[in-house]
């Protein structure tokens, strides 16, 4: 098993908390929050800002830590342990239509309602329940799974 991977992602939610800016494939078969790996010496906030500029040419503001997600999975004989620091973010209001990823044309950034997100897998597991709970205390989500 490789060393655990440290990641950072942003929850960009509209003012009335009805839509969230998410990353997905073009078919929208799953949803996740935009972000990526944290480089050595970089804070989670800096990583979120950098990733959104690199991937979608989008400048955002990064706020408080919302959630810590530990994902420990095994798939196709490989084991992976990711720790993701997820922050509340602002600044997605300029996004009107989906934005295609600068390096991966099969990935887009798009607004989805909470109801849309409930219809398909949204990662990390448990994050929608946290967002809709109205509880602003930092949440620790742990996912341990084995996929065949």
Image (tube, rainbow, N blue to C red):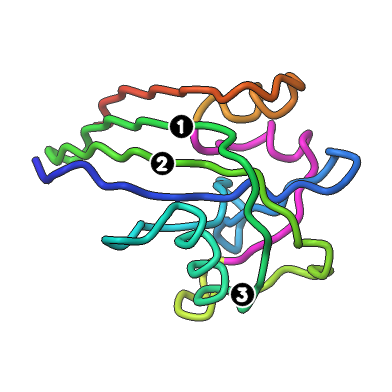
Question: Which label was assigned to residue 68?
Answer: 1
x and y, in percent, of residue 32 in the image: 55, 47
Q: Tell me if label 3 and label 2 are in contact, CB under 8 Å.
A: no
Local crowd size for mark 2, using a 10 Å CA cut-off: few (<14), some (14–19), many (≥20) = many
Quarter of the picture containing the N terminus is top left
User: Residue 24 lies in magenta, yes or no?
Assistant: no
The Cα atoms of the two marked residues, 2 and 1, are separated by 6 Å
Q: Where does the magenta region start and end?
A: 108-124
Looking at the picture, tell me which residue is in the foreground, 70 or 45: 45
Element on which disc 3 rests: strand
Which quarter of the figure has residue 78? top left
- Residue in the image at 53% along x and 32% along y: 67
x and y, in percent, of residue 107 in the image: 54, 66
Quarter of the picture containing the C terminus is top left
- The residue where tag 2 is placed is 84
Question: Which label was assigned to residue 34?
Answer: none
In this view, 27 is above or below 68: below
- Residue in the image at 68% along x and 34% along y: 119
- Residue in the image at 70% along x and 50% along y: 12
Element on which disc 1 rests: strand
The Cα atoms of the two marked residues, 3 and 2, are separated by 23 Å
x and y, in percent, of residue 5 in the image: 26, 47
Q: Considering only order in the chain, which callout, 2 or 3, is on the residue closer to the N terminus?
A: 2
- The residue where tag 3 is placed is 100
| Residue at the far left in the pictured view | 1
């Amino acid at each position: 098993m490789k060393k655990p991977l440290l990641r950072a992602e942003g929850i960009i939610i509209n003012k009335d908390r009805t839509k969230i800016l998410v990353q997905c494939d073009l078919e929208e078969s799953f949803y996740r929050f935009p972000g990526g790996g944290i480089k050595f010496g970089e804070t989670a906030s800096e990583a979120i800002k950098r990733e959104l500029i690199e991937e979608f040419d989008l400048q955002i503001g990064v706020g408080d830590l919302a959630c810590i997600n530990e994902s420990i999975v095994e798939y196709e004989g490989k084991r992976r342990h990711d720790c993701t620091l997820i922050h509340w973010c602002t600044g997605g209001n300029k996004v009107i239509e989906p934005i295609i990823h600068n390096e991966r044309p099969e990935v887009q950034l798009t607004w989805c309602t909470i109801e849309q997100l409930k219809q398909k897998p949204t990662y990390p597991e448990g994050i929608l329940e946290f967002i809709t709970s109205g509880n602003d205390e930092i949440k620790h989500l742990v996912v341990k799974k084995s996929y065949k």
